[in-house]
Structure formats: structure tokens, C-alpha cells
């Protein structure tokens, strides 16, 4: 049986949290551990709850035709969501900087 903790709204990431030095250090450590991003290209992503809601399952369809299935227990779900949110906030900033027109003075 998985213990069901209370959801804590105070822990929801807010704009700017992605700049926290601890978050940046965590992201750098993750990037080093993850390694080659393009070689793990996902072409399909599916989420779904367990019958009693105590797990959230994720199915990843890989470019090579294989499938990866993972399950995240409820007691880690908020932490997972927070990590996802902070990663997406950072990725959005990086993409905006890299692909939008220059904003400096001409």
C-alpha cells in the first residue's frame, strides 16, 4: 500500500524558481547522468492512472520501435510534477533565447 501524502500547494514551482542555484545544479547533474539526449528520442507519450489512482503510468514509444513503461507512485507524484515543471520552464527559456529574433538594440 502506498501512503497518500497531502498535496502541498506551497511547493508548486513559481516563475523564477528555475533560476534557483539548487535547481540549476540539479539540472546540470541530471544532464551529465542522462548523457546523449537525441539517442533517446521519444515519438509517443501516454499517461494514465492505476485503477485505484495510487500510481500514474507512463508509456514512452521510442524511435527505434521499442516501448518503455514506468509507474510513479502517488507519494512521488508532486515531486515528479515539480521537476517536470522546472525543467519545462528552463527549456522554454533556452528555446526562446536560441530561436527567437535578437532583442538587443541595433
Image: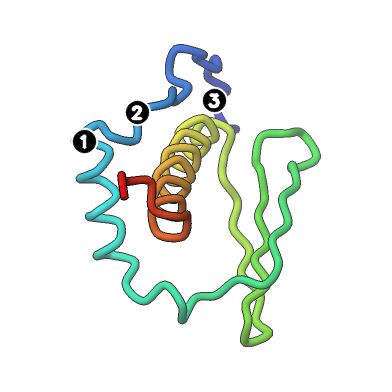
Q: Can you identify the residue that label 3 sits on? A: 3
Residue 22: mark in rendering: 1
Residue indicated by mark 2: 17
Between the residue at mark 2 and the residue at mark 1, the CA separation in whole angstroms equals: 10 Å
Q: Residue at x 40, y 59 (%)?
A: 98
Tag 3, which secondary structure? loop
Q: Residues within 10 Å of mark 3 (few under 14, many from 20)?
A: few
Establish if 4 lies above or below 90: above
Q: Nearer the viewer, mark 1 or mark 3?
A: 1
Question: Horizontal placement of 28 versus 2: left or right?
Answer: left
In the depicted view, which residue is nearer to us: 73 or 77? 77
Specify which label sits upstream in the sequence, 1 or 3: 3
Task: Answer with left or right where residue 20 lies relative to residue 77.
Answer: left
Query: Looking at the rendering, which quadrant does residue 2 occupy?
Result: top right
Question: Which secondary structure lies at badge 2?
Answer: helix
> Which is nearer the N-term, disc 2 or disc 1?
2
Of residue 48 and residue 1, the one placed in the foreground of this image is 48
Amino acid at each position: 500500500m502506498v501512503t497518500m501524502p497531502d498535496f502541498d500547494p506551497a511547493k508548486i514551482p513559481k516563475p523564477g524558481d528555475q533560476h534557483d542555484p539548487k535547481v540549476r545544479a540539479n539540472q546540470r547533474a541530471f544532464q551529465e547522468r542522462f548523457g546523449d539526449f537525441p539517442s533517446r528520442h521519444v515519438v509517443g507519450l501516454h499517461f494514465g492512472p492505476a485503477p485505484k489512482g495510487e500510481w500514474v503510468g507512463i508509456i514512452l514509444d521510442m524511435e527505434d520501435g521499442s516501448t518503455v513503461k514506468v509507474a510513479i507512485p502517488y507519494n512521488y507524484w508532486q515531486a515528479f510534477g515539480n521537476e517536470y515543471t522546472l525543467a519545462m520552464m528552463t527549456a522554454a527559456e533556452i528555446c526562446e533565447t536560441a530561436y527567437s529574433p535578437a532583442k538587443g538594440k541595433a
